[in-house]
Amino acid sequence: MIKVLIVDDEILVRLALKSGIEWKTHGFELIGEADDGVSALKYIEQYQPHIVITDITMPNMNGIELIREAKKINVDIHFIILSCHNDFEFVKEGMKLGAEDYILKLSMNIEKLVDILLNLKDKIKSGPSTRDETMVMKAQESDRLNFIYSLFDDSFQSKDELMNMALELGLSLIGNYYVIGILQFDKQQHAQDSNSSPRISSDDVTLNIIDDIMKGYGMGQVIFFEKGIFLYLFSFQSLMEAEKNLDLIQSICEETVDLIRKFIQIKASCGIGSIVEGISNTKVSYNHAYESLKINFYTGPMSVNRYNPSQNHEEFILKSEEYDQLLQAIEIYDLHLIRVRFIDLLKTMERQQVMRSQNVRMYIHKLIFLIETNIKKITKHIGEYESITRAYMYIQEIHFFNEMIEQIDACLQDFITESMHEDLYACRTEVFKAKEYVLKNYNQPISVATISKIINMNPDYFSHIFKKEAGINFIDYLNEIRIDKAKELMRTQKYKIYQIAEMVGYNNDSYFIKKFKQITGYKPLEYMNEIKG
């Protein structure tokens, strides 16, 4: 009989383990239980158990200290760790000390624990060293990876050769239709994992999580591809079966992403490839999965994206309405309007999701350079704007488009402030004051008469110089600012149309709707529906 000791300070956990497993039926002898590490050491000294199932967080002596001290008594004792999702650092330390496996207490699966125990029993009876077993596992992992490379490179001479190799490696690829999925850690967080324990890493934990989830669904296999990247392999007998199971594949990916975040605090995303016929076409599904994965540039971290054949990545058309409006804002040197038009353009790109991330970065870089060089021509500014330099840096360093938009918007706001503080703004002082007043008071009643009184100027003369300097008459400028502010409020999706009209200075809903349609080409409700997608 293989002797087992249970160590946990929670009586309900001990009771569940004692009563939930038919110990003798499976060839085990439960020699006792302890509620902390100190008591457990006494059992270990007296009864010399083969296996110890231990909690990590306990009074007097925790699970890590218990493993360390027990190994001094008997180096051959095998430990299974019971862990909460926030114990990962302790789990890594325990595995480094020689623990064999771990079980999540919050979702404890007795069947999985029995499987771990039975595997340990076989290992104890056959007596291979941990070093030998690890080398075997690593060799099998390497063989599987080489198999995938050969599969994608069309290196196999025949389908029979390919299938035989798969069976030798424990991969069941029987079927006529296949789907490949890819899971990848967020780059920044994956870099933080580079100093993890050599005994157990985030890759090891993730591999176990995906494998457990797939077994729960009864479908699919996982292969470690490279650091922070994993391949899902699904095979089906018919096209109908494959199509029917796409939602389940999505669920598997979503559960994996959620558990990785909860258990090891790492964000990851998934891409699901197309259904392909024939094992030799799996490279096509892999390529489509990779394209889908890269959509997380738009959809953000922890997203699961399926391949969409209509997503053909046609380049964004430069001569769009938003692009023309940006050029007009640059021509009249209206910094506020430049910022609004620029962000509108980026939001349109975000909705369309047709440009690859690197092309997006190049395009945005060109647009900011266009803004910067044109403003410098007018202001005669020498040197670099700190805010623009920061924007260039964000373009290259930020991984997700939505975050990039937020940071670039902040840079443009700083650019406006920077320019104004340096007295580089090109408009006449009176026009500048009028624009400044509108930006601060657009929600109040404003007319040519009121603004002229504020800046102490004849109304007719003010209208003349404003049109000359700004390239647009004052009332049209006022309406554009108000409508831009209305669009910002609409994007929050918090307010009704009549509320937004009042918030931006319109007392007449009909007039607001008319001006909104005149300036944007949309009725307010149409624009709000467009935002919702």
Image: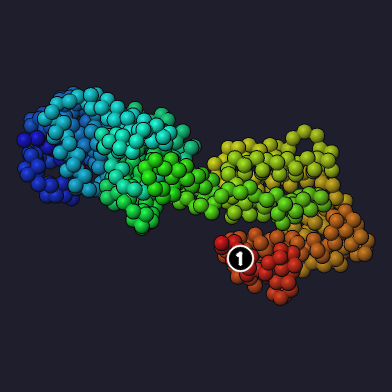
**Image position, residue 112 (x, y; %):** 21, 44
Can residue 10 be seen? no
- Quadrant (top left/top right/bottom left/bottom right) for the C terminus: bottom right
Residue 528 quadrant: bottom right
Q: Nearer the viewer, residue 399 or 248?
A: 248
The amino acid at mark 1 is Met
**Image position, residue 31 (x, y; %):** 8, 38
- At 40% across and 45% down in the image, what residue appears? 180
Q: Is 530 situated above or below 423?
A: below
**Image position, residue 207 (x, y; %):** 33, 39
Q: Is 272 situated above or below 157?
A: below
- Quadrant (top left/top right/bottom left/bottom right) for the N terminus: top left
SS for dot 1: helix
Q: State the scheme by which the image is colored.
A: rainbow
Can residue 72 be seen? yes
Residue 174 quadrant: top left
- At 42% across and 30% down in the image, what residue appears? 194
Q: Nearer the viewer, residue 23 or 303?
A: 303
- At 78% across and 58% down in the image, what residue appears? 437
Left or right position of 492 against 514: left
| Disc 1: which residue | 528
Residue 146 quadrant: top left
Q: Nearer the viewer, residue 384 or 358?
A: 358
**Image position, residue 460 (x, y; %):** 93, 64
Badge 1 local density, few (<14 within 10 Å), some, or many (20+)? some
Q: Is 343 situated above or below 31?
A: below
